Image (cartoon, rainbow, N blue to C red):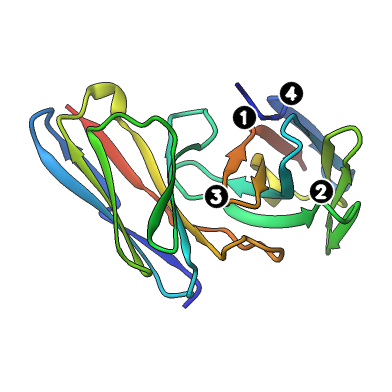
Amino acid sequence: DQQVKQNSPSLSVQEGRISILNCDYTNSMFDYFLWYKKYPAEGPTFLISISSIKDKNEDGRFTVFLNKSAKHLSLHIVPSQPGDSAVYFCAASAYNNDMRFGAGTRLTVKP
Amino acid sequence: DTEVTQTPKHLVMGMTNKKSLKCEQHMGHRAMYWYKQKAKKPPELMFVYSYEKLSINESVPSRFSPECPNSSLLNLHLHALQPEDSALYLCASSQVPPGEAGGYTFGSGTRLTVV
């Protein structure tokens, strides 16, 4: 039972444009949401997070939006850079430290 | 120190061997995790320790045995593994509860191959 879903396995955008990565979740107990970037054979690197009491969190080029009623969050990267090319995982955590990952979206930013 | 350190980075073991994976953090985090990641799949939660007590066990086979000797260390003891257990094993730590500002920190993983 996948509690966190990323329905787009891949996304390709042009350098300088916006990248939008989407994530849906089913467990209403999740109260904390995170985005990780991952390269092969490495641990996930934290990018940005948002708690369930907020609907937006911004950090430089990265913005995460949360729509609790729709159980949906998205990561916006503006402007996209070739160095952003990686697999991005959405994760959701409940108060008891139970954190689950989505399947990941491979982002390719073309020069 | 803002890192989670995992050793060894690579491990090859036979199906009759006994080995251990180690994880260490000195950030004062009181929750520690083991995840398993197969190629092109997301990390899958195996175990969560909260205040050195096992709080979540995701129905992991008994050939994987976690241990949390103190608040900085987390071990995963391996015995009689199968080739399908070959994967990247990731350790993570966080505050309890995780809080904002990226409360989870991951190690770089142990690449395990069972032959």
Identify whether A19 is placed above or below B73: above
Marks 4 and 1, the one that precedes in the sequence: 4
Q: Who comes first in sequence, dot 1 or dot 3?
A: 3
Q: Closest to the observer: A109 or B85?
A: B85
Disc 1 or disc 2, which is closer to the eye? Answer: 1
- Tell me the amino acid under the disc marked 1: Ala
Location of residue B79 (image quadrant): top left
Looking at the image, tell me whether mark 3 or mark 4 is earlier in sequence order.
4
Q: Are marks 4 and 1 on the same chain?
A: yes
Going from N to C along the chain, the mark reached first, 2 or 3, is 3
Q: Badge 3: how crowded within 10 Å, few (<14), some, or many (20+)? A: many
Q: Chain of mark 1?
A: A
Residue found 68% across the figure and 25% down from its top? A9
Q: Which mark is residue A44?
A: 3
Counting from the top left corner in percent of width and height, residue A16 is at 87, 48
Q: Is residue B95 left or right of residue B81?
A: right
The quadrant of the image that shows the N terminus of chain A is: top right
- Horizontal arrangement in the rendering, residue A94 relative to residue B11 (left or right): right
> To which residue does mark 1 refer?
A103
Residue depicted at x 68% and y 51%? A83
Figure quadrant of the C terminus of chain A:
top right
Q: Secondary structure at mark 4?
A: loop
Q: Amino acid at mark 2?
A: Ser
> Quick check: marks 4 and 1 in contact, CB under 8 Å?
no
Residue A28 appears in the rendering: yes
Residue drawn at the location 54% of the way across and 45% of the way down: A39
Residue that badge 2 annotates: A80
Identity of the amino acid at label 4?
Asn
Tell me the element at label 2. loop
Give the image location of residue A72, x and y in percent.
Answer: 84, 35
Chain letter belonging to callout 4: A
